[in-house]
Amino acid sequence: MSNGSQSESGSVDVGFATQRGRDWPSVRQFNVFLENRIGELLNVVRRFENSNMRIVSLMIVDMSDCAILRIVLSDPERALEILRQANLPVTETDLLVVGLPETAQPLLEISKHLLMAEINIHYAYPLLSHPDGKSAVALHVDDHETAVTTLKNAGFTIYTEKDLIQ
């Protein structure tokens, strides 16, 4: 099975088409591994102070000897470049960002729909900067595509990376 086509020069045009782009129904989270010591968070956050990027959300997972900074920025391509230039150990994770409905228990509504589809939520946290001025929650789930389909079919708003760019 070929992933590309042969050009006139004999070289193979790989033509990789990816499912992910700024309209892919996810948002990239960067997981930055840090020493667990005073000032490490400031060292990372300062790398973005002279840019027009916004920190959309962040969460710190604290362990005794290290910490994991989970961070979402408004321009993930540039953010990744900055993190790599700083030689910070970083990985990427896809998050599902869901607009909270204006109900008395919005997280209950989201959770019920995901439970009915047998989708597990690994972790969740709110966004600091809200798309369209509306509250939203970032979710890491075990079946991203099914979660997107389930929540869209239930009428929830799913945000993409392009929704976070200001």
Image (tube, helix red, strand yellow):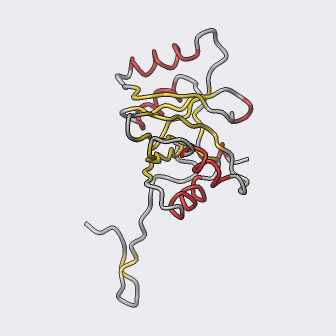
Place of residue 118 in the rendered image (x, y in percent of width and height, measured from the top left): 34, 22
Q: Residue at x 49, y 38 (%)?
A: 95
Nearest the camera: 163 or 125? 125
Place of residue 122 in the rendered image (x, y in percent of width and height, measured from the top left): 39, 29
Residue 11 versus residue 63 in the image, above or below: below
Place of residue 67 in the rendered image (x, y in percent of width and height, measured from the top left): 44, 40
Looking at the rendering, in which quadrant would you find the N terminus?
A: bottom left
Furthest-bottom residue in view? Answer: 9
- Left or right of 142, for residue 23: right
Residue 100 versus residue 143 in the image, above or below: above
- Left or right of 8, for residue 132: right
Nearest the camera: 88 or 64? 64
Q: Residue at x 49, y 47 (%)?
A: 30
Q: How many marks?
A: 0
Q: Residue at x 40, y 83 (%)?
A: 7
Residue 64 versus residue 50 in the image, above or below: above
Res 145 quadrant in image: top left
Place of residue 86 in the rendered image (x, y in percent of width and height, measured from the top left): 53, 61
Residue 90 versus residue 41 in the image, above or below: below
Furthest-front residue in view? Answer: 38
Furthest-top residue in view? Answer: 104
- Left or right of 136, for residue 10: left
Nearest the camera: 73 or 61? 61
